[in-house]
Image: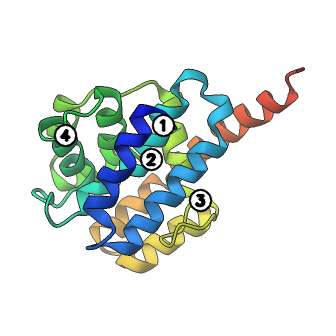
Amino acid sequence: MSELTKWAYPLAESLLAEQLPRRWQHSQGVAERARIIAPILGEDAELLVAAAVLHDIGYSPDLAKTGFHPLDGARYLRDVANADKRVVNLVAHHSCAWMEAEARGLREELEGEFPLEPAHLNDALCFCDMNTTPDGTPTNPIDRVNEIAGRYGPDSLIGTFIRRAEPEILASTSRVLERVAAAKRQPM
């Protein structure tokens, strides 16, 4: 485990485990998916694992300021935790966050404060998040989108956002799977 992940796990646990145990299970599962796809990320593998375990800390009642968890989590990581800038940016933009930010009237704030990381990293974090159930077990993005829409309701802000984001979530997943398949085809 790198220094970055040694730092990220206890921080995420301290913010989620007691108050939001199911969210903590989900975050650990997302980090596990990140470890599984690590071979396609090279030197960015640990960066992805750290962002994965931290991606939902903005749900913590101690951090929730705007009610938009990617922004709240990223601001905490930047302003309080002095986190690696790339981890902060990945948390801010995870899983098509710009679409939800737009629906909340926060897109300019999100994009103004946090630059996007390279597309392959955003795809990878989206893949990990959307292939993990709320309980931290593996799933697929279609079932995950359906679960989110069902949990929040189809006409809610989140239900509407997740349906709007579904094509991009599926495209991100496809791109990651293509990279995984290509890596497996490489000679040793």
Q: Earlier in the sequence, mark 2 or mark 4?
A: 2
> Which numbered marker is on residue 87?
none
Per the image, the residue denoted by label 2 is 52
Q: Is mark 3 on a helix, strand or loop?
A: helix
Vertical relation: 156 (above or below) 63: below
Q: How crowded is mark 2: few (under 14 residues within 10 Å), some or many (20 or more)?
A: many
**What's under tag 3, amino acid-wise?**
Pro
Per the image, the residue denoted by label 4 is 81
Q: How crowded is mark 4: few (under 14 residues within 10 Å), some or many (20 or more)?
A: few
Q: Which of marks 3 and 1 is nearer the N terminus?
A: 1
Per the image, the residue denoted by label 3 is 141
Q: What element carries label 2?
A: helix
**What's under tag 1, amino acid-wise?**
Leu
Q: Residues within 10 Å of mark 3 (few under 14, many from 20)?
A: many
Q: Which quadrant would the C terminus be assigned to in this image?
A: top right
Per the image, the residue denoted by label 1 is 48
Q: What element carries label 4?
A: loop
Q: Do the residues labelled 1 and 2 touch (CB within 8 Å)?
A: yes
Q: Which of marks 3 and 4 is nearer the N terminus?
A: 4
